[in-house]
Structure formats: structure tokens, C-alpha cells
Image: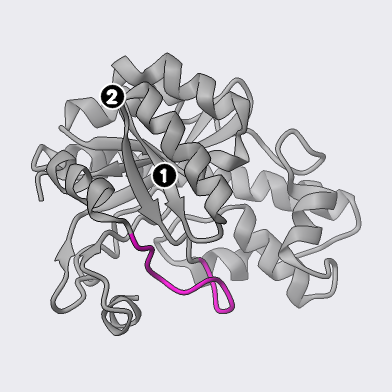
């Protein structure tokens, strides 16, 4: 990942794995400012919300310790979803999938990838559309970490927090930003790999209206995804750097 970022000329880099900081130490592209980060998987009334947390020089190790519990809860959740898939006629080798994952976080993308590999789905989108969507027949809500607890945890370690890929939440995303602005949710991922100009400008305007910092992310998960790196104009990059203390 670091080599990809370096090849793209990325100047500010944060590896934000789901509920894990394990790869941050190795992911330091040459010539780039590296910030430790994580993408927290949170529960909001039974639906999944992702919050990006970035280390701004606080007690980051406390967050790392809490995430070990979250990852273990996700492994239990993973086995429940495997059982639900099997009841729908899709049997996957859960032990092999967990062994391949090692210490990293497992979740629905792992199931979707395995379903495509065995022919049970034609694509990631197909796997989610028919089986893995929020409140769907296979998904299990992530009750381990609520939005409120995630924000409390982030504040306690001095992290800067941003709502990831807000387009997935629509009006609900705007409501989350309004509700939790005072709780530390002071950023929004307005620059996102797949956004067109209209989507980007929409979230920039939301950020301006709510006095939020615009963050950016590629959301790179696998080969074939959009390239790493998003470009922020100086008018947004400078406030982002100041927000991060970079």
C-alpha cells in the first residue's frame, strides 16, 4: 500500500483499515506525511456507520487496545453470518477465511469476495444486493461500538473524526453530522475516490454550512478499485492539515 501511494505521489497518507491499526507502522510512503488512522465500524440504530479517526497526537494506544475487543466481536459476528449464508445454501470455509485474515478485521467484504470466488455471487455488488445489505437476511448489526461510544473514545484519545463515504447515508448522513458535530464529528469525507463533481460539491457545501473540515479518501479495498489518492485544492487541504496538526 505504501509503495502504491508513493508511486502516486501522495503527500499526506493515512491507512484506515476497518477497526484495526495493525498496518499503520509499515504503511509510511517515502516523501509523504503519514498519520495514524482507523475506520471505526459503528452501530446507529441497527445500521452500520463508518467513522474515520485520525491520530492528532493524543493517547492513541488506548484506542488500539479497545479495538482488539471490537475485532474479536467482529469475528463472532462473522461466524454468525457464515451460518446464515449456509442456511441460504451458500457454504463457505469460515476457518480458512479467518486463518487467511490473520489479525486483521473480517467482515462482509471478505464474505462477498469468497462468494464471488465460489460462484455464489457474480460481483461484490451482487453479493451485497442479494444477501449482505444492512438489515438484510445475512447481515448482523455491529452492536459492539455505537456511534456515541466511538466518538467518546475518539475524543478521549484526542483523535480527529470524520464521517466516511457520506453518500452511502444520504439525508441520514447529514442528520448524523448535525447531531454529533458537538461530540467531535468535525469532518466529512467530501473528497472521495468515486465522486463526480456534483457529489463532491454537495458535500463541500454541507461541510461549509456545518463548519466541518473536508477530508479525502480513496476507499481502496482490492485490485481493480480506483487508484489511491485524491486531490484536495489548497482551500481545503490547508484546513485539513491544520485540523490534523500536520
**Residue in the image at 56% along x and 46% along y:** 199
Q: Residue 121's quadrant in the figure?
A: bottom right
Magenta region includes residue 223: yes
Residue 67: give x, y in percent of width and height: 34, 42
Q: Is residue 195 above or below residue 49?
A: below
Q: Is residue 22 above or below residue 51?
A: below
Task: Give the main secondary structure of the magenta stretch.
Answer: loop
Residue 4: give x, y in percent of width and height: 35, 81
Q: Please give left or right for residue 64 compared with residue 189 in the image.
A: left
Q: Nearer the viewer, residue 32 or 156?
A: 32
**Residue in the image at 26% along x and 78% along y:** 9
Q: Which residue is mark 1?
A: 189
- The magenta segment is 221-231
Q: Please give left or right for residue 154 compared with residue 246 in the image.
A: right
Farthest-out residue, right: 89
Q: What's the mark number on residue 216?
A: none
> Can the viewer see residue 50?
no
Cα separation, mark 1 vs mark 2, equals 15 Å
Amino acid at each position: 500500500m505504501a509503495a502504491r501511494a508513493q508511486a502516486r505521489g501522495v503527500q499526506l497518507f493515512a491507512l484506515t483499515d476497518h477497526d484495526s491499526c495493525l498496518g499503520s507502522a509499515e504503511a509510511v510512503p517515502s516523501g509523504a506525511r503519514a498519520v495514524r488512522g482507523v475506520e471505526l465500524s459503528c452501530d446507529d440504530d441497527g445500521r452500520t456507520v463508518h467513522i474515520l479517526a485520525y491520530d492528532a497526537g493524543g493517547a492513541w494506544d488506548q484506542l488500539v487496545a479497545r479495538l482488539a475487543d471490537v475485532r474479536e466481536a467482529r469475528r463472532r459476528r462473522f461466524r454468525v453470518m457464515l451460518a446464515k449464508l449456509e442456511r441460504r445454501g451458500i457454504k463457505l470455509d469460515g476457518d480458512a477465511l479467518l486463518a487467511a485474515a490473520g489479525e486483521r478485521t473480517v467482515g462482509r467484504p471478505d464474505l462477498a469476495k469468497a462468494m464471488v470466488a465460489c460462484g455464489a455471487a457474480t460481483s461484490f455488488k451482487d453479493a451485497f444486493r442479494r444477501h449482505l445489505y444492512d438489515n438484510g437476511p445475512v447481515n448482523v448489526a455491529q452492536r459492539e461500538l455505537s456511534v456515541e461510544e466511538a466518538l467518546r473514545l475518539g475524543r478521549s484519545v484526542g483523535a480527529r473524526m470524520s464521517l466516511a463515504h457520506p453518500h452511502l447515508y444520504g439525508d441520514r448522513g447529514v442528520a448524523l453530522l448535525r447531531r454529533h458535530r458537538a461530540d467531535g464529528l468535525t469532518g466529512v469525507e467530501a473528497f472521495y475516490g468515486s465522486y463526480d463533481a456534483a457529489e463532491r460539491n454537495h458535500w463541500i457545501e454541507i461541510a461549509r454550512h456545518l463548519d466541518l473540515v473536508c477530508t479525502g479518501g480513496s476507499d481502496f479495498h482490492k485490485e481493480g478499485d480506483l487508484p489511491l489518492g485524491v486531490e484536495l485544492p489548497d482551500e481545503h487541504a490547508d484546513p485539513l492539515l491544520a485540523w490534523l496538526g500536520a
